Image (cartoon, grey):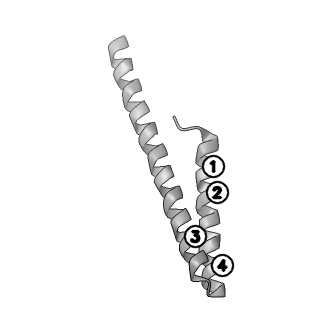
């Protein structure tokens, strides 16, 4: 499964991106706002990859368990 620290790191990256986006929007800084959106998208992609890794590992473990019976 994905390392818990990776999951926390990716959620934190998403939160930082959201803060950047909101700060950029509040200050009229389009670059910062866009950077925040990009950071969020990257963090969400990493979270999706974490979920996929977990699903694959669970599937492999099920198959291994079926052969042990």
Residue placed most toward the observer, 30 or 21: 30
Residue annotated with mark 2? 12
Does label 4 or label 1 sit earlier along the sequence?
1
Viewer-nearest of discs 4 and 1: 4
Provide the secondary structure element on which disc 4 rests.
Answer: helix
Residue annotated with mark 3? 36
Residue at x-position 62% and y-position 83%: 29
Does 57 sit above or below residue 27?
above
Residue at x-position 62% and y-position 87%: 28
Viewer-nearest of discs 3 and 2: 3
Circle 4 residues within 10 Å: few <14, some 14–19, many ≥20:
some
Residue placed most toward the observer, 35 or 14: 35
Q: Cα distance, mark 1 to mark 3? A: 18 Å
Residue at x-position 52% and y-position 70%: 37
Could you tell me if the residues under marks 3 and 4 are in contact, i.e. CB atoms within 8 Å?
A: yes
For the view shown, which residue lies furthest in the bottom direction?
28
Residue placed most toward the observer, 31 or 45: 31
Provide the secondary structure element on which disc 1 rests.
Answer: helix
Provide the secondary structure element on which disc 2 rests.
Answer: helix
Does 46 sit above or below residue 62?
below
Q: Cα distance, mark 3 to mark 4? A: 9 Å
Does label 3 or label 2 sit earlier along the sequence?
2
| Residue 58 falls in image quadrant | top left
Could you tell me if the residues under marks 2 and 1 are in contact, i.e. CB atoms within 8 Å?
A: yes
Residue placed most toward the observer, 46 or 64: 46
Q: Cα distance, mark 4 to mark 2? A: 16 Å
Residue annotated with mark 1? 8
For the view shown, which residue lies furthest in the top direction?
69
Q: Cα distance, mark 2 to mark 1? A: 6 Å
């Amino acid at each position: 499964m994905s390392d818990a620290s990776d999951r926390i790191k990716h959620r934190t990256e998403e939160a930082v991106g959201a803060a950047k986006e909101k700060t950029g929007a509040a200050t009229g800084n389009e670059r910062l706002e866009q950077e925040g959106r990009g950071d969020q998208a990257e963090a969400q992609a990493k979270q999706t990859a974490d979920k996929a890794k977990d699903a694959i590992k669970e599937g492999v473990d099920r198959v291994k368990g079926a052969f042990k019976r």
